[in-house]
């Protein structure tokens, strides 16, 4: 089952960015949306490893954004690799303290210039 609203758009995003977004699921009792993606082209997927890029998720219904938390003892909750490796899955856990994003919501994941739209939260 395709987790994106349009398979052709997913293919276009993958071709353009070198990243295949696996989807977004709620973790930690719905307090953390968990985004997973796979690098299919290391050169095109390099922006994913850019530590300056601050990924976020936009709830399409309300326009609210959820960001990556950065607890002082562990740091930012995302993949630590600074060099993209093809076929490796990367993750990012976003803070959702008020649970404004729920299962079934449509969201957009933004990582640098990559915008993956119409993802349905599981």
Image: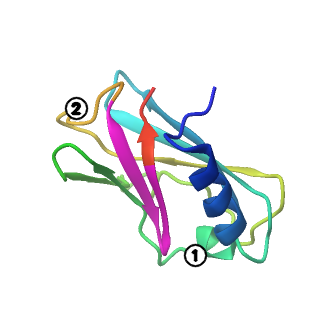
The residue that appears at 27% across and 40% down in the rendered structure is 96
Query: Which quadrant holds residue 9?
Result: bottom right
Is residue 36 found left or right of 102 in the rendered image? right
- Horizontally, residue 83 falls left or right of residue 72, namely right
**Could you tell me which secondary element the residue under label 1 belongs to?**
loop
Give the mark nearer the N terminus: 2 vs 1: 1
Residue located 48% across and 39% down the image: 34
Q: Which residues are magenta?
A: 105-117
Q: Residue furthest top?
A: 29
Left or right of 45, for residue 47: left
Image coordinates for residue 101, horizontal then vertical, percent: 27, 35
Q: Nearer the viewer, residue 59 or 66?
A: 59
In this picture, is 39 found above or below 41? above
Image disc number at residue 99:
2
On whether residue 116 falls in the magenta region, the answer is yes
What residue is shown with label 1?
50
């Amino acid at each position: 089952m395709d987790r994106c609203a349009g398979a052709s758009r997913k293919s276009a995003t993958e071709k353009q960015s070198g990243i295949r977004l696996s989807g977004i699921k709620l973790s930690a009792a719905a307090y953390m949306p968990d985004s997973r993606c796979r690098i299919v082209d290391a050169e095109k997927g390099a922006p994913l490893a850019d530590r300056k890029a601050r990924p976020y998720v936009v709830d399409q219904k309300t326009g609210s954004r959820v960001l990556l938390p950065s607890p002082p003892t562990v740091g930012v909750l995302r993949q630590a690799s600074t060099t993209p490796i093809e076929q490796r899955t990367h993750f990012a856990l976003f803070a959702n303290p008020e649970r404004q994003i729920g299962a079934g919501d449509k969201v957009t994941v933004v990582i640098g210039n990559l915008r993956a739209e119409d993802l349905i939260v599981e």
